[in-house]
Amino acid sequence: MPPIPQSPEAPDEILTTRRIAAPRALVFQAFTSPEHVGAWWGPDGFSTTTSEMHVAPGGAWRFVMHGPDGKDWPNLITYVEVVPPERLVYDHGDGEGPPQFHVVVTFEEDDGGTFLAMRAKFKDAAARRYVAENFKAVEGGRQTVARLAAYVATLLDKAGG
């Protein structure tokens, strides 16, 4: 089945998409539950420790991503909009200064599965280019949603299908 059409990526955005072979409610749950998100969040080789996760408008997710090189990366997500199981809107930063980017995540039903789209919008094209080049954010996003898909598959296996 062809992917669900999405508007193209703008010069100040990173768009990450993936079709996940799991029901939308389960994908949304894996994305928004502290007991799940630490098992898959981040690029290959990273682990994540959550200290707070309150998925509601005005709520926060505070976490540290632990890099394969041993470096820790503090993160703060502040939720702007939460529409289970359809949409998340949040600002993403490190908790020290203003948010570095704004994210809209959509979860669309797709023939028994879920089409996930994460659109990260930066203040300008230079900021987008900086994270893409210095933090490999485009490939990191792809790896992160691939890890989500693999994790959700394990949940389906445990549930028997």
Image: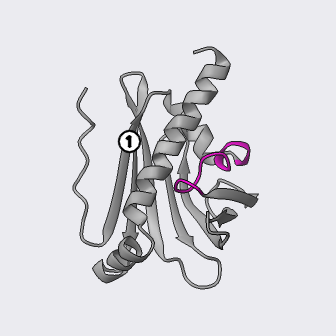
Q: Secondary structure at mark 1?
A: strand
- Colour mode of the rendering: one colour
The quadrant in which the C terminus is found is top right
**Within the image, what quadrant is residue 159 found in?**
top right
**Within the image, what quadrant is residue 121 found in?**
bottom left
Q: Please identify the residue farthest to the top as the structure is shown.
A: 160
User: Where in the figure is residue 38, as x and y percent of width and height?
Assistant: 68, 50
User: Where in the figure is residue 49, as x and y percent of width and height?
Assistant: 73, 59
Please give the name of the residue rendered at 42% of the width and 22% of the height, measured from the top-left corner: 112
Q: Please identify the residue farthest to the front as the structure is shown.
A: 69
Question: Which of the two residues, 74 or 61, is positioned nearer the viewer here?
Answer: 74
Q: Is 44 one of the magenta-colored residues?
A: yes
Decide: is 72 above or below 117.
Answer: below
The quadrant in which the N terminus is found is top left
Q: How many residues crowd around disc 1 within 10 Å: few (fewer than 14), some, or many (20 or more)? A: some
Decide: is 156 above or below 60.
Answer: above
Q: Is 138 one of the magenta-colored residues?
A: no
According to the picture, the residue beneath numbered tag 1 turns out to be 18
Q: Main secondary structure of the magenta part?
A: loop
Please give the name of the residue rendered at 60% of the width and 66% of the height, measured from the top-left corner: 78
Q: Please identify the residue farthest to the right as the structure is shown.
A: 51
Number of marks drawn = 1
Please give the name of the residue rendered at 67% of the width and 69% of the height, measured from the top-left corner: 70
Question: Which of the two residues, 157 or 102, is positioned nearer the viewer here?
Answer: 157
Q: Which residues are magenta?
A: 34-45
User: Where in the figure is residue 124, as x and y percent of width and height?
Assistant: 32, 80
Decide: is 98 above or below 155.
Answer: below
Question: In the image, is 87 to the left or to the right of 47?
Answer: left
**Within the image, what quadrant is residue 14 found in?**
bottom left
Please give the name of the residue rendered at 62% of the width and 69% of the height, measured from the top-left corner: 69
Residue type at numbered disc 1? Arg
